[in-house]
Image: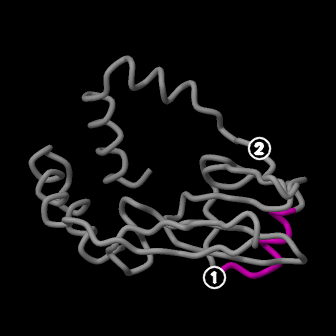
């Protein structure tokens, strides 16, 4: 962790309830599902090679994405971790990152999400404005590093 992330984790450890922690512990590291058309998906936070640690950024070479897909049996890989929206299509398979509703990191401060039409296969990315001033204020009032609040305005 960078020092800001470490402080945020420690803050969460102090304020989360036992019920919150138990809920998080019960969440699966990966989820596999199939849609009505028979297309299969692996949903994972970071990467199938390192579910909690690996960052798959859109600017990586295609060979890197092919290597990641070699770990996946499913048609498509849905992931996050980078907070950067991405759609990579490689040999009929896709790697999809919807971005981030909180703290997008692609230079656009608005919340990012994606919708997938499983009938047509179309993936669309969307942005939503939110009260960034209020969010930043709450971060600062909570005693978290100002950097975490300031970065909201830049989407970095």
User: Which residue is label 1 attached to?
Assistant: 59
State the separation of the CA atoms marked 1 and 2.
26 Å
Residue for point 75% across, 72% down: 120
The C terminus is located in which quarter?
bottom left
- Residue 52: x %, y % from top left: 60, 47
* Marker disc for residue 32: 2
Identify the magenta region.
Answer: 60-69
Describe residue 14's horizontal placement relative to residue 125 as left or right. Answer: left
The furthest residue to the top: 18
* Marker disc for residue 15: none
Label 1 vs 2, first from the N-terminus: 2
Q: Quadrant of residue 89?
A: bottom right
Describe residue 121's horizontal placement relative to residue 17 as left or right. Answer: right
- Residue 24: x %, y % from top left: 49, 30
Count of numbered badges drawn on the protein = 2
For disc 1, the neighbor class at 10 Å (few under 14, some 14 to 19, many from 20) is few
- Residue 53: x %, y % from top left: 60, 51
For disc 2, the neighbor class at 10 Å (few under 14, some 14 to 19, many from 20) is few
Magenta highlight: main SS? helix
Dot 1: what SS? loop
Dot 2: what SS? strand
């Amino acid at each position: 962790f960078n020092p800001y992330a470490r402080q945020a984790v420690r803050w969460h450890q102090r304020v989360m309830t036992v019920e919150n922690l138990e809920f998080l512990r019960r969440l699966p590291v990966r989820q596999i599902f199939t849609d009505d058309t028979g297309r299969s998906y692996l949903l994972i936070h970071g990467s199938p090679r390192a579910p909690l640690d690996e960052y798959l950024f859109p600017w990586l070479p295609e060979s890197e994405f092919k290597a990641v897909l070699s770990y996946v049996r499913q048609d498509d890989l849905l992931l996050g971790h980078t907070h950067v929206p991405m759609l990579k299509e490689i040999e009929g398979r896709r790697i999809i990152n919807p971005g981030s509703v909180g703290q997008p990191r692609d230079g656009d401060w608005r919340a990012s999400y994606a919708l997938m039409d499983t009938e047509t296969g179309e993936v669309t990315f969307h942005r939503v404005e939110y009260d960034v001033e209020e969010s930043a204020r709450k971060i600062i009032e909570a005693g978290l590093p100002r950097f975490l609040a300031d970065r909201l305005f830049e989407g970095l």
